[in-house]
Image (cartoon, coloured by chain):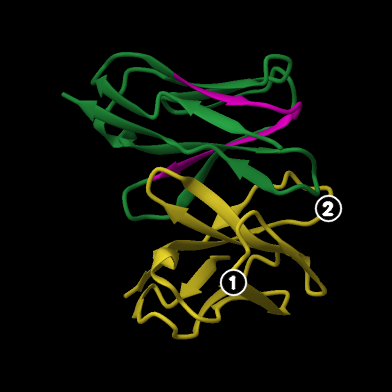
Chain colours: A yellow, B green
């Protein structure tokens, strides 16, 4: 089945460490997204990419960076993790222009920063 | 700035009864999405509504969109325990625009 996968699924790290979360997809979608979810706050967009050469900041990009290594891969990095980056992180994908913009989500990565 | 509001944020439902939950948004749009999330799980796409008056139904759930009122409703018919989850709506301002999510409504179905 065409799918969206995320690694790792769980990660505990310490303040100041560099962390990379990875997302891969076999859906053949052009567009990829990174969100974080915090209790009571819904989903907030961190970064998004409409194709390999396109990277855009979302509403909460400070403290994060991304890399779109290929159409199928989109990585999120925390250069120096801090405790308030503890959250559930989701990657999502969608088809390109002309499609419905419906997004399909990966299973999530639970990140804890001590 | 687009704002998406869902209410109520929590709803306790009795098995077998009908309920409606709402999603309001602040900027004209004809693209609205409903997602379901079970505790600790990912988001699952339920409905994609892409025009004024659009209505989609799946099992006991029916979603509709009124773009003039900037309102989508999700109607639940004869609630069952399996419908207990958090339901998010999201709005997009265009085909090349990102989604803005509401905070979600947590539904709990009791016997």
Which residue is located at x 79 percent, y 40 percent?
A: B94
Q: In the shown orientation, is residue B29 left or right of residue A46?
A: right
Dominant secondary structure of the magenta stretch? strand
Say which of A16 and A44 sits in front.
A16
**For mark 1, what is the residue?**
A64
Q: Where does residue B35 sit, x and y in percent of width and height? A: 50, 41
Which quarter of the picture shows residue B56? top right
Which residue is located at x 35 percent, y 14 percent?
A: B18
Dot 1 falls on a residue whose secondary structure is strand
Would you place residue B81 above or below residue A45 in this image?
above
Would you place residue B95 above or below residue A17 in this image?
above
Which residue is located at x 54 percent, y 29 percent?
A: B5
**For mark 2, what is the residue?**
A97
Which residue is located at x 42 percent, y 53 percent?
A: A38
For mark 1, name the chain: A
Q: Marks 1 and 2: which is nearer the front?
A: 1
Q: Which of marks 1 and 2 is nearer the N terminus?
A: 1
Image quarter where the N terminus of chain B lies is top right
Task: Please state the extent of the stretch shown in magenta in the rendering.
Answer: B21-37
């Amino acid at each position: 089945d065409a799918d969206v996968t995320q690694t790792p699924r769980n990660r505990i790290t310490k303040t100041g460490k560099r962390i990379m979360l990875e997302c891969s997809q076999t859906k053949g979608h052009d567009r990829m997204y990174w969100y974080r979810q915090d209790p009571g706050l819904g989903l907030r967009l961190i970064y998004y990419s409409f194709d390999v050469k396109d990277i855009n900041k979302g509403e909460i990009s400070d403290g994060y960076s991304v890399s779109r290594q290929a159409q199928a891969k989109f990585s999120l990095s925390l250069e120096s993790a801090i405790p308030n980056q503890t959250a559930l992180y989701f990657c999502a994908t969608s088809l390109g222009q002309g499609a419905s913009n419906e997004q399909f989500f990966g299973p999530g990565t639970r990140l804890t920063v001590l | 700035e687009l704002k998406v509001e869902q209410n109520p944020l929590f709803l306790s439902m009795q098995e077998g009864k009908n309920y409606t939950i709402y999603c309001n948004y602040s900027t004209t749009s004809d693209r609205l999405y409903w997602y379901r999330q079970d505790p600790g799980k990912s988001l699952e796409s339920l409905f994609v509504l892409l025009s004024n008056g659009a209505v989609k139904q799946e099992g006991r759930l029916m979603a509709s969109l009124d773009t003039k009122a900037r309102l989508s409703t999700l109607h639940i018919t004869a609630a069952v325990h399996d419908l207990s989850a958090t339901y998010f709506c999201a709005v997009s301002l265009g085909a090349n625009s990102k989604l803005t999510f509401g905070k979600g409504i947590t539904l709990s179905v009791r016997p």
